[in-house]
Amino acid sequence: MQRIDVNERITGLERLNPTTRPTTSPFLEGLWNFEWFGSGSPGLFAARVVFERFPSTLARMSKMNLLLKDGYAKVAAHLKLLNSIESKFILSTKVSVEGPLRMKEEYVEGIFESPTIVEETIPEQLKGAYSQALTTAQQLPVPIRDAVANGLRVPLSKHSIFPIYS
């Protein structure tokens, strides 16, 4: 039902928009905050990583935004795991115009930022395991600790064409 509702709203907005070539409009560039993360939204790759890999009881996406500027985009998906661990997945892409209503998105890199843990929200039954994990992490060799602290970078190369609604 949500998908139908969103598609109807998009169709209604398309009729109101006087922009004939939205892919080249200067109003397209900037910071976009997404309120809906379903199929068809830009940055779907980031959303799919969360929704396909984790059950909703373990992980959820709290927000997603997109920064589009000078032919490049960064999609940031803010994740919350077990209501205690917060992290961010950042997807970098190169964007090119395919026509007046279509753009091509080439995935460049994905970064899983190191998670932050809100210690006050950790359930009592997990606090012992959390302390053990901290101790183990502190004993890792410095190069590995540094790599984890800076996030996990994943090079990507995938093309996706998505419509820009007029």
Image: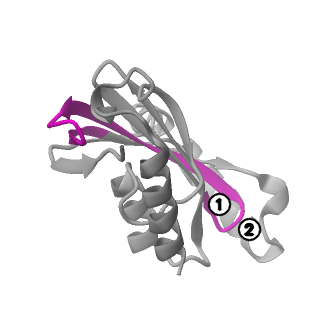
Looking at the picture, which amino acid does disc 2 mark? Gly
- Foreground residue, 34 or 126? 34
Which residue appears at 40% of the width and 71% of the height? 53
Alpha carbon separation for disc pair 1 and 2: 6 Å
68 over 32 or under it: above or below: above
Which residue appears at 38% of the width and 49% of the height? 43
Which residue appears at 16% of the width and 37% of the height? 99
Magenta portion: prevailing SS class: strand
Q: Is residue 108 left or right of residue 88?
A: left
Q: Secondary structure at mark 2?
A: helix
7 over 141 or under it: above or below: below
74 over 85 or under it: above or below: above
Which residue appears at 45% of the width and 40% of the height? 17
Q: Find residue 103 and report its image quarter.
A: top left
Q: Which quarter of the image is occupied by the C terminus?
A: top left
- Foreground residue, 162 or 150? 162
Q: Which residues are magenta?
A: 80-109
Q: Secondary structure at mark 1?
A: helix
Check disc 1: other Cα within 10 Å, few if <14, some if 14-19, many if 20+.
Answer: few
Residue assigned mark 1 = 132
Q: Is residue 98 left or right of residue 75?
A: left
Q: Are marks 1 and 2 in contact (CB under 8 Å)?
A: yes
Residue 20 locus on image (x, y percent): 31, 34
- Colouring method of the image: one colour
**Could you say which disc has been placed on residue 149 in the image?**
none
Residue 93 locus on image (x, y percent): 28, 35
Looking at the picture, which amino acid does disc 1 mark? Gln
Residue assigned mark 2 = 128
40 over 107 or under it: above or below: below
Residue 30 locus on image (x, y percent): 48, 25
- Foreground residue, 115 or 11? 11
Q: How many marks?
A: 2
